[in-house]
RNA sequence: CGGGGUGUAGCGCAGCCUGGCAGCGCACCGCGUUUGGGACGCGGUGGUCGGCGGUUCGAAUCCGCCCACCCCGACCA
C-alpha cells in the first residue's frame, strides 16, 4: 500500500476524549474512528490487523475440528422467547419490530440460533461431536461504553458452540478450547492468564475467562502467587480462619447514638471491626413460572468484610440483585444503620459462614441509636441460608495453600462456558442415543472479541513513540520509507518485496524525513526499511526493527532476502511460545 | 440511572465572566527554498460557534429546554 493514497491519516494529537493508551494510539495511528458511544469504524489498517487476528482464530478453531458458518445478526423474537431470555434480559438487548409488526432482536450472542439449527440438523449420536463457529457482529447496549475498543456496544466476536452427546464429550471439547484459546492469544502476541469465572447470564456449570492483566481492566482478579490459584473476584474463594472460641455472653442492648456505620461503631465501643456484624440490604428479583417476584434480602457479614454481590446472587438463586431503597428496609421494621436479623420478619436472611461461627458479635438492635452486644448465631437468630457471601480482598488467605492472595485488574478477552442442556432442552434440540432414547444435545459456548483483542495488543505493545506490533497482527509486516535520492530504488524494492509475498506499507509521500520516521514509529510495523541517498552511499538499504534501536545496512540485492528472513525469525519467536498449558478447573 | 465534565475548522485549544468583524497552533492547498528524526518564507482554503427557543437594536457570549460525547459509580462480556 502506498501511503500517499491511504485512507486514514495519522494525527499528532489524540482527540481529547481518548484517555487510555490503546485508544489514543489506535486513533492517532489511523486504525479506528469513533462513530458514536461504543461504536467504531475500523479504518483500512485496523481492518487488516483485525483480519489477521480473526485468521488466527480460524486456524485454531479449524485445528480442533471447528466448522465455520455464519449466523444472522437480526433474530425473530420467538427464539429468544422459547429459551426465556427475551424476558430475562433487560435493556442490554435491543428490540424492534419489522414491517409486519413482528418482534425482532439484535443478536447479543448466538446460543439460540445454534440450538435452533441443531434441532433441525442433528438427529443421531453418530453425528456427534460437532463444533461450529462464526465471526459476527454482536450488539449489546451497554449502559457505559469506555476506553476505546475495550468496552463497546457493537463488536465482532468469534463465538463457537460445541455439540455433544454427553458431559464427557463436552469436557473434551471444553478442554480443547482451553488450549486453543491460549494458542490464539499467544499467536497474536497477547499475554493472558485463565481464571475461574462466574457463569452469569449464560447459565451452565463451569466457566473460565481469559484475562489480559492491565490497570485499564474493569475486572478484579484474585491471584495466589504461591500455588497458582486464580479466579475472578466475583467468585474468588478464600480461607476464613476459625475465630477464637468464646462462651456465648448475655445479649445486651446498649445506646449508640449517632453511630450508624461499622467504622463509628468499632470506635465508639473500642472493639475491632471483626467483632461486629454488618447488615447489607438488597432487593432480589426471582424468575418463576408465575412471573417475577421480588424479595428483600438481608445479608449479614462480619464487620471487617464486604458482601460479594455475585456470590450472594448465586447463593439465593436470584435473577437480579440491586441495593434496597430505604423505604423497603423500613417496611420490614429495620432501621438502616442499626439493623440486625434479630426479631425481624419479612426478609430473606443470608448469613456468611464466618458470622455463623463467630461468637458475641455486636449488631444492630433494629432501633435508631441502639445496638446489641454479644449476638450469637443460632441462639439469637437463624438464617434462611448460610453461605460464603464475602468478597475476597488483597492479603486474604488462599483457599488452597493459605498464603496471602493478591488482587489485580484485567480485561476479559475471552471466555469459555460449559452450557449443558440449558438451550438445547428449552428449544428441543434432541438426538437419539445408541439405545434409541431421545436426549438433548449437550452444549458449550466459547467467545473471543476481535476488537477488544486488538485494543489489548495495542495496550501491551507500545512505547512513548507509538505502537509496536507483533509480526502476526501487524497490518503490514514492512514499513518501507523512501527519502530523497532513494525514490527509484525504493519503488523497485516495493515491487520486489510484494512479489516475495510480504505485506508492505510504502511511504512514498513528499514529506520530510522527520515526519516519515515519526509516522513509522507511531504506526509501529515490525520492520522498517529506509532507502535514501545516504543509505545507498553506505552500501544499500537501512534495516531496522521497530522494537530495537540498532540499524544496519544491507546491500540492495539482499534486502528482500534479509527482510523475509527477519519475518521468519519474528514468526519463529511467536511459535516458540505455543506450548501445552495444563488444564485447571 | 445517579454524580462530575465537555461541545467553537480534520485534531488540539483561546474567545464567553463584562453581548458589538470568529481567532490561534497543527493539518490541508499554491509558489519558492529546504529535507536522515514532527523545516522555513510568502500567499491561500475550510465554521449554520452541538440543536431549538427566548431576551436584546445586536447572541459563540445572557436565560430556558433538548441532544451528543467523555470520566466516576451502578451495570455488564
Image (tube, coloured by chain):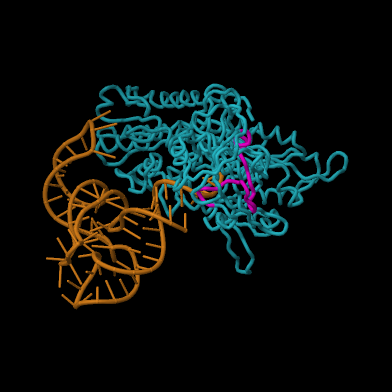
With respect to residue A65, does A38 lie above or below?
Answer: below
Q: Residue at x 55, y 53 (%)?
A: A324
Does the magenta portion include A549? no
With respect to residue A189, does A121 lie above or below?
Answer: below
* Region of the chain picked out in magenta, as a range: A335-357
Position of A502 compared to A242: left or right?
A: left
Q: How many marks?
A: 0
Q: At which x and y percent is residue B9? A: 28, 56
Q: At which x and y percent is residue B31? A: 17, 49
Q: Nearer the viewer, residue A342 or A437?
A: A342
With respect to residue A239, does A234 lie above or below?
Answer: below
Q: Residue at x 65, y 59 (%)?
A: A76
Q: At which x and y percent is residue A314? A: 64, 43
Chain letter matching colour cyan: A
Q: Quadrant of the N terminus of chain A?
A: top left
Question: Which residue occupies the extreme right position in the image?
Answer: A435
Position of A146 compared to A237: left or right?
A: left
Q: Nearer the viewer, residue A406 or A145?
A: A406
Is residue A147 in view from this perspective? yes
Q: Colour of chain B?
A: orange
Position of A550 compared to A301: left or right?
A: left
Q: Nearer the viewer, residue A406 or A352?
A: A352
Q: Quadrant of the C terminus of chain A?
A: top right
Does the magenta portion include A350? yes
Q: Nearer the viewer, residue A472 or A419?
A: A419
Q: At which x and y percent is residue B15? A: 19, 58
Is residue A139 in view from this perspective? no
- Report which quarter residue A483 is drawn in: top left
Amino acid at each position: 500500500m502506498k501511503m500517499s493514497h491511504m485512507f486514514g491519516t495519522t494525527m499528532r494529537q489524540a482527540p481529547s476524549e481518548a484517555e487510555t493508551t490503546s485508544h489514543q494510539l489506535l486513533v492517532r495511528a489511523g486504525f479506528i474512528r469513533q462513530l458514536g458511544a461504543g461504536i467504531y469504524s475500523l479504518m483500512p489498517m485496523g481492518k487488516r490487523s483485525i483480519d489477521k487476528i480473526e485468521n488466527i482464530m480460524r486456524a485454531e478453531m479449524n485445528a480442533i475440528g471447528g466448522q465455520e458458518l455464519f449466523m444472522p445478526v437480526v433474530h425473530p423474537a420467538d427464539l429468544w422467547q422459547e429459551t426465556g431470555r427475551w424476558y430475562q434480559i433487560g435493556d442490554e438487548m435491543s428490540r424492534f419490530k419489522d414491517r409486519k409488526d413482528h418482534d425482532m432482536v439484535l443478536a447479543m450472542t448466538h446460543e439460540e440460533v445454534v440450538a435452533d439449527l441443531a434441532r433441525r440438523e442433528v438427529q443421531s449420536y453418530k453425528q456427534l461431536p460437532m463444533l461450529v463457529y462464526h465471526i459476527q457482529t454482536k450488539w449489546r447496549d451497554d449502559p457505559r461504553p469506555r476506553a476505546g475498543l475495550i468496552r463497546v456496544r457493537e463488536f465482532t466476536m468469534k463465538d463457537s458452540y460445541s455439540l455433544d452427546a454427553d458431559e464427557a464429550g463436552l469436557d473434551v471439547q471444553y478442554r480443547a478450547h482451553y488450549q486453543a484459546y491460549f494458542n490464539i492469544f499467544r499467536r497474536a502476541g497477547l499475554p493472558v492468564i485463565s481464571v475461574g469465572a462466574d457463569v452469569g447470564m449464560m447459565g451452565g456449570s463451569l466457566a473460565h475467562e481469559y484475562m489480559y492483566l492491565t490497570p485499564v481492566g474493569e475486572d478484579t482478579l484474585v491471584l495466589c502467587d504461591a500455588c497458582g490459584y486464580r479466579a475472578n473476584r466475583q467468585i474468588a474463594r478464600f480461607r476464613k480462619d476459625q475465630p477464637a472460641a468464646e462462651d456465648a455472653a448475655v445479649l445486651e442492648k446498649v445506646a449508640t447514638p449517632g453511630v450508624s456505620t461499622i467504622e463509628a461503631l468499632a470506635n465508639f465501643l473500642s472493639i475491632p471491626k471483626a467483632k461486629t456484624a454488618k447488615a447489607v440490604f438488597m432487593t432480589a428479583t426471582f424468575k418463576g413460572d408465575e412471573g417475577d417476584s421480588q424479595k428483600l434480602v438481608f445479608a449479614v457479614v462480619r464487620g471487617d468484610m464486604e458482601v460479594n454481590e455475585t456470590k450472594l446472587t448465586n447463593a439465593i438463586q436470584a435473577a437480579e440483585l440491586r441495593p434496597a431503597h430505604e423505604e423497603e428496609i423500613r417496611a420490614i421494621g429495620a432501621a438502616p444503620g442499626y439493623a440486625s436479623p434479630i426479631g425481624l420478619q419479612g426478609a430473606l436472611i443470608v448469613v456468611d459462614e464466618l458470622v455463623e461461627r463467630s461468637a458475641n458479635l455486636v449488631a444492630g438492635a433494629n432501633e435508631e441509636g441502639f445496638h446489641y452486644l454479644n449476638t450469637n448465631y443460632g441462639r439469637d437468630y437463624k438464617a434462611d441460608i448460610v453461605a460464603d457471601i464475602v468478597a475476597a480482598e488483597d492479603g486474604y488467605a488462599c483457599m488452597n495453600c493459605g498464603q496471602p492472595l493478591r488482587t489485580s485488574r484485567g480485561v476479559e478477552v475471552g471466555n469459555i462456558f460449559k452450557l449443558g442442556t440449558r438451550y438445547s432442552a428449552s428449544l428441543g434440540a434432541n438426538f437419539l442415543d445408541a439405545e434409541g432414547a431421545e436426549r438433548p444435545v449437550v452444549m458449550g459456548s466459547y467467545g473471543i472479541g476481535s476488537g477488544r483483542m486488538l485494543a489489548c495488543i495495542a495496550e501491551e505493545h507500545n512505547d512513548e513513540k507509538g505502537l509496536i506490533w507483533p509480526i502476526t497482527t501487524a497490518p503490514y509486516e514492512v514499513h518501507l520509507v523512501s527519502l530523497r535520492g532513494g525514490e527509484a530504488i525504493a519503488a523497485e524494492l516495493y515491487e520486489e518485496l510484494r512479489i516475495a509475498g510480504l505485506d508492505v506499507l510504502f511511504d512514498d509521500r513528499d514529506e520530510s524525513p522527520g515526519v516519515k520516521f515519526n509516522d513509522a514509529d507511531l504506526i509501529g510495523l515490525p520492520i522498517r526499511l529506509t532507502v535514501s541517498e545516504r543509505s545507498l552511499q553506505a552500501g544499500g538499504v537501512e534495516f531496522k526493527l521497530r522494537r530495537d534501536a540498532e540499524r544496519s545496512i544491507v546491500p540492495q540485492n539482499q534486502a528482500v532476502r534479509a527482510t523475509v528472513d527477519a519475518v521468519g525469525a519474528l514468526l519463529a519467536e511467536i511459535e516458540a511460545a505455543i506450548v501445552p498449558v495444563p488444564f485447571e478447573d
